[in-house]
Image (cartoon, rainbow, N blue to C red):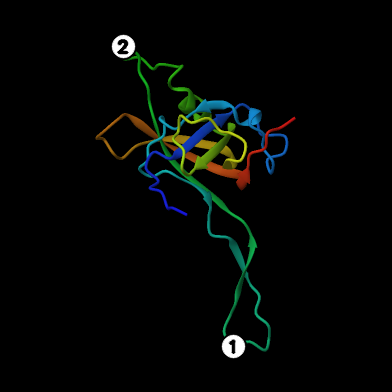
Amino acid sequence: MARMLADAKTTLILLDALPEDPDNPTVAELEGENASCVVGKAGFSIGAGSPNTEADTPLCTEGESQIPTSKTYEANMNIYRYFDEDGQIDPEEDFFFRALEDFGSEIHVAVREGGKGHKDPIVEGDEVSIYTLIAGGMGRSTDGAGYTKRVAHVTVAAGWEDKLVVAGP
């Protein structure tokens, strides 16, 4: 088995809807808009966070034990803005920003990491993680260099991680 460098090997898809069974997503359900080139690498993270814990130590044990009681998820991303030749926002290219710009809006995304490039289609047997994100506003980037971007404040409402894609009906 070979390890692979992660550079340019993450695919982020804005889904049209949550798959009917997110534990067994189909190829057709994972077709959507590829957002891999509209989100910056710097600061990008999505997935399981530190679990909520509770102290639950038996009387016969010295010290204190923490046990996990529930999952948490985290997401951080910088979204590039796109402009037309007149310097106005290009609504077609600015699709991911538009999907998250309204406070409280809900979107679904799929993330694939591994040995395939972002342009390679998702196929049966690929491993993906699916998340439901709730928009919490768009902040201004503290990084004034590079491309124009916004910091997407999102909350992960639900996650299904490391699921194999099935062919479907």
Q: Residue furthest front?
A: 1
Q: x%, y% of residue 33?
A: 52, 25
Q: Residue furthest top?
A: 86
Q: x%, y% of residue 156?
A: 57, 44
Find disc 2 in the rendering and name its residue.
Answer: 85
- All told, the count of numbered labels is 2
Local secondary structure at mark 2? loop
**Amino acid under disc 1:** Glu
Query: In front: mark 1 or mark 2?
Result: 2
- Residue 113's label in the rendered image is none
Local secondary structure at mark 1? loop
Find disc 1 in the rendering and name its residue.
Answer: 62
Which one is earlier in the sequence, the residue at label 1 or at label 2?
Answer: 1
- Give residue 51's quadrant in the image: bottom right
How busy is the neighbourhood of tag 2: few (under 14 within 10 Å), some, or many (20 plus)?
A: few
Q: Nearer the viewer, residue 165 or 94?
A: 165
Q: Residue furthest left?
A: 145
Q: How far apart, in angstroms, are the residues tagged by discs 1 and 2?
A: 68 Å
Looking at the image, which residue is at 40% across and 30% down? 37
Determine whether, in the image, residue 82 is placed left or right of residue 108.
Answer: left
**Amino acid under disc 2:** Glu
Q: Nearer the viewer, residue 103 or 53?
A: 53
Q: x%, y% of residue 21?
A: 72, 39
The correct choice, above or below, for 84 with respect to 18 in the image is above
